[in-house]
């Protein structure tokens, strides 16, 4: 059974259909890139996958014991986080909150989990640094560590490189690949950049209010739609 | 300073007011960390105006003010929360509308019945003399509950303050914690209102955090610093109020302004030094 199976799902906002005819699967250890222009329905679909929005029709089913609680999420950064006083450790630790249960305070196991995730994204030397004083790339790493602290099963990354310079973006892609390939974490990345989809991910889902393409990245590069969006580039 | 404090402590009503005030200032500053960082500062302001309306009506009808004002403020806080979450109506404008409306209704009710007496004046600008022994007991109990709940909810409040979307996505019932935050804030605002005045109580929520953020960089340090600033500001403010016979609320706010400026300068100096 697949980790996530989406059957003919459609989402509406204020009675208007935003995205429909969604049919795709996410298997364990997949690296799926959801690509499309702004307003194509990517963010709505992500909300659906996270259980923050229910599909108007069709269905999303989770398999292999996955629940909406076990999805790690890297949201797009908000303006209000820029001046937020918090250390990297505090931020990452807050990712483990879903395993807190009825206890009021974090356990030692949760603390060591947080430290392990900080180490994994290469931020150990910054663990006590103030989040707001980090560079954009470092902030994204810290937030990635928080998502990993929440779950090891599935990560959803919403435009993870949106505000990064090219070097930091390449680092981020490298880190995501490593987490996917070497640690076996399933990754769903949302991007408006078709090149990222074609060259970083294993599978591509191209949206434009409906599903234009779903398949492997290699097929995407060869397809009509892929060629059109990649601008005639073929590798 | 010590002598003045000793003299103040020889009056039973002042001891009562100081105890209640300290607890309320502590609650307000702790909850303020979340409220300010969540961009909910205006909710505190809105609540105080609603609280004024409720107190005015209670004093006219003849109900014990706290018993009416606390439930009304909790209800209003849920409404304010909904307003600020809603993208359709402009949240800040709606809050401004509600608070001005509640203030106006309170004033109308009072002026058509008892007239603008010292009670009403006290609700607007605050007075430590308006606290009865029974009120003080209730206030001390309620603010202790707020403090205990704040500590027990600390990790959860951090999570929903820093990133509500992420928390919701990982299965945290953020609405429950937002409601809890709003409830605690309502209780705190009503308790503090009669000492600080409806027009000034929100400063207890906002000033200490902003002051602490000039220096603190981590959430825990900002929280602790904010509590310390609130306590210091309250005690100094009460001393100023006693020595110069000034209203307590305004004195406390003025001391807080000075503390804020001191911290801002200290923060700027530290940033300049570390950059070198």
Image: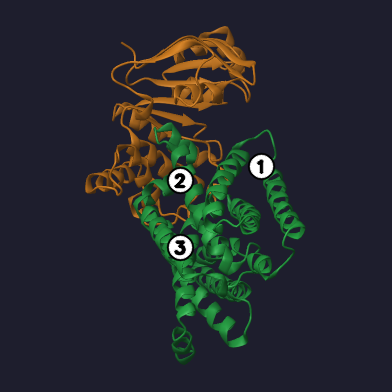
Chain colours: A orange, B green
Q: Give the numbered dot on residue B180.
A: 2
B155 or B15, nearer to the observer = B15
Q: Quadrant of residue B89?
A: top right
Q: In the displayed structure, would residue B34 be above or below residue A113?
A: below
Instruction: Count the numbered circles shown.
Output: 3
Element under label 1? helix
* Percent position of residue B142, x then y: 43, 58
Could you tell me which chain the residue with mark 3 belongs to? B
Look at 43% across and 42% down and name the residue there.
Answer: A143
Name the residue rendered at 74%, 63% in the picture.
B115
The chain under label 2 reads: B
x, y (%) of residue B264? 57, 70
Q: Residue furthest left?
A: A109
Whole-percent x, y for residue A43 in the image? 55, 26
Is B234 on the left-hand or right-hand side of B219?
A: right
Are callouts 2 and 3 both on one chain?
yes
Q: Up-down: is A41 above or below A6?
A: below
Q: Secondary structure at mark 3?
A: helix
What is the secondary structure assignment of the residue under circle 2? Answer: helix
In the rendered image, residues at marks 1 and 3 fall on the same chain = yes
Nearest to viewer (mark 2 / mark 3): 3
**Of the pair A197 and B250, the residue shown nearer to us:** B250
Q: Is residue A36 left or right of residue B184?
A: right
Q: Residue at x 56, y 40 (%)?
A: A163
Distance (Cα) linking label 2 and label 1: 20 Å
Q: Which residue is mark 3?
A: B139
Q: How far apart are the two marked residues, 1 and 3, measured between alpha carbons?
A: 31 Å
- Badge 2, how many Cα within 10 Å: few under 14, some, many 20+? some
Q: Are marks 2 and 3 in contact (CB under 8 Å)?
A: no
Q: Which residue is mark 1?
A: B91
């Amino acid at each position: 059974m697949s980790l996530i199976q989406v059957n003919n799902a459609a989402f509406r906002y204020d009675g208007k259909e935003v995205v429909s005819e969604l049919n795709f699967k996410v298997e364990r250890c997949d690296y799926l890139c959801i690509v499309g222009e702004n307003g194509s329905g990517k963010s709505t679909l992500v909300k659906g996958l996270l259980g923050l929005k229910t599909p108007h029709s069709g269905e999303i089913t989770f398999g292999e014991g996955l629940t909406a609680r076990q999805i790690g999420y890297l949201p797009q950064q908000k303006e209000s986080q820029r001046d937020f006083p918090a250390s990297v450790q505090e931020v990452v630790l807050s990712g483990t909150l879903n395993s807190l249960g009825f206890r009021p305070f974090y356990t030692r196991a949760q603390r060591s989990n947080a430290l392990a995730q900080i180490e994994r994204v290469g931020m150990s030397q910054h663990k006590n640094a103030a989040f707001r004083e980090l560079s954009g790339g470092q902030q994204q790493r810290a937030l990635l560590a928080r998502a990993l602290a929440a779950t090891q099963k599935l990560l959803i990354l919403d435009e993870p490189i949106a505000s990064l310079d090219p070097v930091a973006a390449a680092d981020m892609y490298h880190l995501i690949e490593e987490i996917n390939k070497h640690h076996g974490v399933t990754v769903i990345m949302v991007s408006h950049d078709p090149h990222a989809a074609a060259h970083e991910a294993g599978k591509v889902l191209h949206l434009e209010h409906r599903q234009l393409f779903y398949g492997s990245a290699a097929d995407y590069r060869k397809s009509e739609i892929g060629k059109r969006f990649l601008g005639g580039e073929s590798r | 300073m010590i002598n003045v404090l000793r003299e103040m402590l020889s009056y039973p009503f002042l001891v009562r007011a100081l105890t209640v005030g300290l607890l309320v200032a502590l609650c307000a500053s702790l909850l303020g960390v979340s409220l300010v960082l969540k961009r909910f500062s205006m909710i505190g302001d809105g609540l105080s105006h609603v609280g004024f309306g409720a107190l005015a009506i209670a004093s006219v009808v003849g109900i014990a003010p706290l018993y009416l004002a606390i439930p009304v403020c909790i209800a209003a806080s849920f409404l304010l929360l909904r307003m600020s979450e809603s993208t359709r109506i402009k949240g800040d404008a709606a809050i401004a509308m509600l608070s001005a409306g509640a203030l106006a209704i309170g004033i109308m009710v009072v002026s058509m019945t008892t007239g603008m007496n010292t009670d009403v004046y006290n609700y607007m600008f605050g007075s430590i003399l308006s606290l009865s022994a029974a009120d003080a007991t209730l206030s001390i109990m309620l603010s202790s509950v707020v403090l205990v709940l704040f500590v027990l909810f600390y990790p959860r409040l951090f999570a929903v303050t820093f990133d509500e979307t992420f928390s919701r996505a990982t299965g945290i019932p953020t609405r429950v914690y937002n409601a809890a935050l709003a409830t605690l804030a309502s209780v705190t605002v009503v308790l503090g209102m009669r000492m600080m005045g409806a027009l000034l109580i929100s400063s207890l929520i906002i000033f200490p955090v902003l002051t602490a953020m000039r220096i603190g960089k981590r959430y825990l340090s900002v929280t602790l610093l904010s509590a310390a600033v609130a306590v210091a500001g309250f005690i100094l403010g009460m001393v100023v109020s006693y020595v110069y016979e000034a209203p307590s609320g305004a004195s406390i706010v003025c001391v807080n302004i000075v503390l804020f400026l001191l911290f801002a300068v200290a923060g700027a100096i530290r940033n300049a030094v570390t950059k070198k």
